[in-house]
Image (spheres, rainbow, N blue to C red):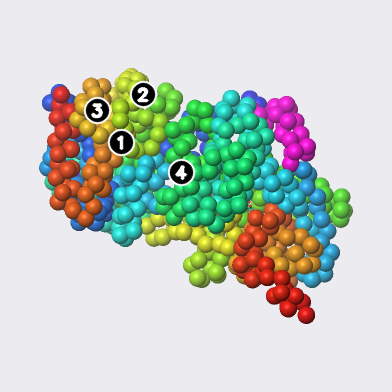
Amino acid sequence: MTDLDKLDHHGADAHGWYGGSGSFGGRFMPEALIAALDELEVAWQKAMLDPTFLQEFESMLQNYAGVPSMLYDAHRLSEHAGARILLKREDLNHTGAHKIRNVLGQALLTKRMGKTRVIAETGAGQHGVASATAAAYLGLDCTVYMGEVDTERQALNVARMQLLGAEVVPVKSGSRTLKDAINEALRDWVASVDHTAYLFGTAAGPHPFPSLVLSFVRGIGDEARRQCLDLTGRLPDAIAACVGGGSNAIGLFAGFLDDPDVAIYGFEAGGEGVDSGRHAATIFAGSIGVLHGARTYVLQDDDGQTVESHSISAGLDYPGVGPQHAALSASGRASYLPVTDEQAMDAMALLARTEGIIPAIESAHAVAGTLQVAKERPGETLLVNLSGRGDKDMGTALEYFGLGNAEATAEEGR
Amino acid sequence: MTTSAGVAFEKARTDGRAALVGYLPAGFPTVDGGIAALLTLVEAGCDVIEIGLPYSDPVMDGPTIQAAAQQALEAGVRTTDVLRTVEAVAATGIPTLVMTYWNPVERYGVERFAQSLADAGGAGLITPDLTPDFAPEWIAAADGRDLDKVFLVAPSSTDERIALTTAASRGFVYATAVMGVTGARESTSELGGPLVARTKRIAEQTAPGLPVGVGLGVSNGAQAAEVASYADGVIVGSAFVRALLDHPGDLDAGRRALAALTEDLAQGVRS
Ligand SMILES: Cc1ncc(COP(=O)(O)O)c(C=O)c1O
């Protein structure tokens, strides 16, 4: 057996199938990109066995990104919820979300592979900002594809990426949102693959991306497990995370998959309600299909055309989901449930007022879902991944809550 | 009755020339307009027809084909319309393939799609985002009905992968001569010749006699002649789509442009 054979495939077989051959995952990709995916897979597997690479990655996380993030015992929120809620504070990481872990890993791997340029897709701009950050930090050229609709919604993040030295390309094709940004990044990659790495922003896409991304974000769960044992002397009764493509969720879940007594919840964007058709609850309400290189749950019509998703949170606004989550749902190990825009925004305000923490709207979905879980599990310990902070979402909050007018707030306060 | 694309390649080979393969998406500009446009390609001298199934996320296509596919989808084209288009074109006796991203086939049902395609007289499928190692279901469904399975090779393909791909292909194997998406190009790629030579050498072992078609970028007779000097078939897509896009709202003018371009290309593959 070679070292590579011994490597933990993070639950996938050698072809990238999760949950059995032909089920979820795989690599549905143009032949032109297969060599690059193979090259990436081999380089990544070697890197994960190389103490130098792992040390360098750890050191970047600690000295640059602020990892490990703390596990915070949210007393006032717990009182409100009727269960003990622990928050894994990924919002405190550099650039404000768990995403920095993934991009630092992938960018370091890019350097190791001798490539000089990275490309990335972004929806809200979080992964784009993280990619631009990692590129600046490691001295790589960076191009970020972003749907034209999103560049307009998230102008501040466009400016951030530009300030960090990245080129931001507005994508005008298709629905001009995240899925089309992925298409455009793939088109770039087909033509630039000899010197360019694609920093995929979530635990989805063709093999090896779901496993590779997991390997860089699984620190979330490993740290949280240790921290929970230190803090409470036992494992949590349940863990929860929001699910867009699934990176922050799989990062947390991976630490607890082998603990059968720990219940696992993923919360998808229910948008305006699953029955409204305007949502991004891919596992809960979608069907099995192939999108962006993997077989997984997809929002699609009867002809297999991708249907546009909707969520108040741009980071969850994606009509696909990582294949690992599809497999965890099918096996029953994890439950995936929708949280509406309204429930998420209420949870955002609640967390701000009870704990002085303004979460990203994505993460607020996880908090809102956990409040529901608390009703079924009173008094239990529930660990939630607070995947990001809300700075980027203040524009949405301002509009949603009608904030920004000091007189109105004073009025309300009386 | 379905006719394999291999038959048309064989006939061209007997004539001492390369085959001309023409692509247009179904439903563009309308379903009936698309059928009329495809029949123009047949009449003006294409040897094999590829009908694109418009898809919401066409990662291998450049702006020209994306625009056509999007127009078709916005006009409401359905998978059944694509099959109707196949039926109308295949009725002329020309080998007629469907070029499709994988999800619409999976959604329709692989077995069911293969049967509907065969019933419509279609020759088989070209699958730009499905490689043989992930295609066991399609391969079984196609083999059961003698349908063509056109897989792709690229300049970046290793010899092992070319062996795998040619062994699994039927009808012809599609060599993408550039590293990039579809779209007409100023000059033909210098990657095409070596890729075809490598593919032919390997196919001698894995699939003797399998024709090699070259696509991506060809837009005129001179380029077609150059590609025809080393390949068994010249595949043209974006240039045809462009001819129609350049005549919005005037299908007759678009068809005249298609006919003129086809004749130029047909001369190219014969020079
Ligand atoms: C803070 C935050 N959480 C969650 C997500 C969703 O992504 P994933 O499901 O990959 O964690 C995003 C994506 O932008 C995000 O910014």
Say which chain tag 2 marks.
B
Quadrant of the rendered structure where residue B212 is? top left
Whether the magenta-drawn stretch holds residue A388 is answered as no
- The boundaries of the magenta stretch are A44-65
Q: Earlier in the sequence, mark 1 or mark 2?
A: 1
Tell which tag, 1 or 2, sits nearer the viewer.
1
The residue beneath circle 1 is B184
Task: Kindly tell me whether mark 3's CB lies below 8 Å from ligand 1.
Answer: no
Q: Position of residue B75 (x, y in %)?
A: 30, 60
Q: Is mark 3 on a helix, strand or loop?
A: helix
Q: Distance between the residues labelled 1 and 2?
A: 16 Å
Instruction: Check whether the beta carbons of the residues at disc 3 and disc 4 lie within 8 A of each other.
Output: no
Amino acid type at image mark 2: Leu
Q: Quadrant of residue A140?
A: top right
Which residue position is annotated with label 3? B223
Are tags 3 and 4 found on a single chain? Answer: no
What is the secondary structure assignment of the residue under circle 2?
loop
User: Which one is in front, B73 or A16?
Assistant: B73
